[in-house]
Image: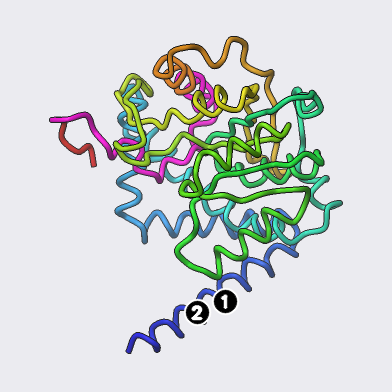
Amino acid sequence: MQPLKNAVGQFLSRGVLGLVRALGRLPLPVVRGVGTVMGCILCVLALPRLRVVLVNLELCFPHWTRRQRWSKAVRTFVYFSQSWLDRGWLWEAPPQVLERRLRRIGNWGALDEAGPVIIFSPHFYGLDAAALAVSLRTTRQCTTIYTPQRNLLVDAWAARGRQRFGDVHLMTRYDGVKSIVSLLRKDGLLFLLPDMNFGPEESIFVPFFGIPTATVPSLSRFARMGRARVVPLIARITPQGYEMEMLDAWEGFPSDDVAADTALMNLRLQGWIETMPEQYFWVHKRFKTRPAGEPSVY
């Protein structure tokens, strides 16, 4: 029975990937239209995940009405679906197509300055587009830390897509800090996404939208160990593709206080989220880990 289930799973995975790759060859409005329909369907089919989104929005935006929360929840599923289908062209289309659809604004000259750089790119739905925009823009060695996908076909496709331009090294959270810091100190770039809940063992509690939230303090620690500048990169989905804004390097970061640095990271992230709340990764159980004695919010 298990071999049959595995064979069916492989068949379905290949079918889904084939469909996504085929859609990637169509005009962008068509891809986005399919993503809109897919997002609305997911709202109905993925009810447990919809509840997660609604809880997250209620915690972070308590002043919103119920109608506002539901509207943003539907939009976040649409952006989630659109960004997933967009990988069909992000990871397959020729560079000239990407350059038309990936608009860079802000201080991209920061990538040309000497010295190690950490690119802080939070979990907005455009994060894969942002990573490609970086690898298309620089010849410097770029390391990114990622979580392997359970589906091996999807994982292999994602790895190929993320590494097809530039000098990109994919590492997992289990590869060890020394290897990551070593690559960073060689005048490298580290593409870091530390705004997820990885459990109490790797986190400290600092405020996020006024809520004590388990947060990985890796941005401060890697910046200190790698003697690196921190440059934020904010990705936004647009009708034309994506807009990636490279901000100026943070002054006085890191400090001597890891907790204060991590709280500052969350505060600045909160400000960016407030400009486009429906494009943040609310499908993640950001508040799953609670301080001792506090009940689950989900």
Which one is nearer the viewer's eye here, 218 or 209?
A: 218
In the picture, the quarter occupied by the N terminus is bottom left
Q: Position of residue 33 (x, y in %)?
A: 62, 56
Q: Amino acid at mark 2?
A: Gln
Q: Which residue sits at x=63%, y=30%?
A: 118
Location of mark 1 (residue): 14
243 lies left or right of 155: right
Q: Decide if residue 78 is in sight here.
A: no
Q: Residue furthest left?
A: 293
**Quadrant hosting residue 129:** top right
In the picture, the quarter occupied by the C terminus is top left
Q: Decide if residue 251 is in sight here.
A: yes
Q: Which residues are magenta?
A: 267-293
Against 254, residue 189 (above or below) is: below
Which one is nearer the viewer's eye here, 290 or 252?
A: 252
Q: Which residue sits at x=57%, y=42%?
A: 179
Location of mark 2 (residue): 10
135 lies left or right of 277: right
Against 149, residue 223 (above or below) is: above
Q: Position of residue 64 (x, y in %)?
A: 36, 26
Q: Is residue 114 magenta?
A: no
Q: Is residue 288 magenta?
A: yes
Q: Check if mark 1's residue and mark 2's residue have beta carbons within 8 Å.
A: yes
**Quadrant hosting residue 181:** top right
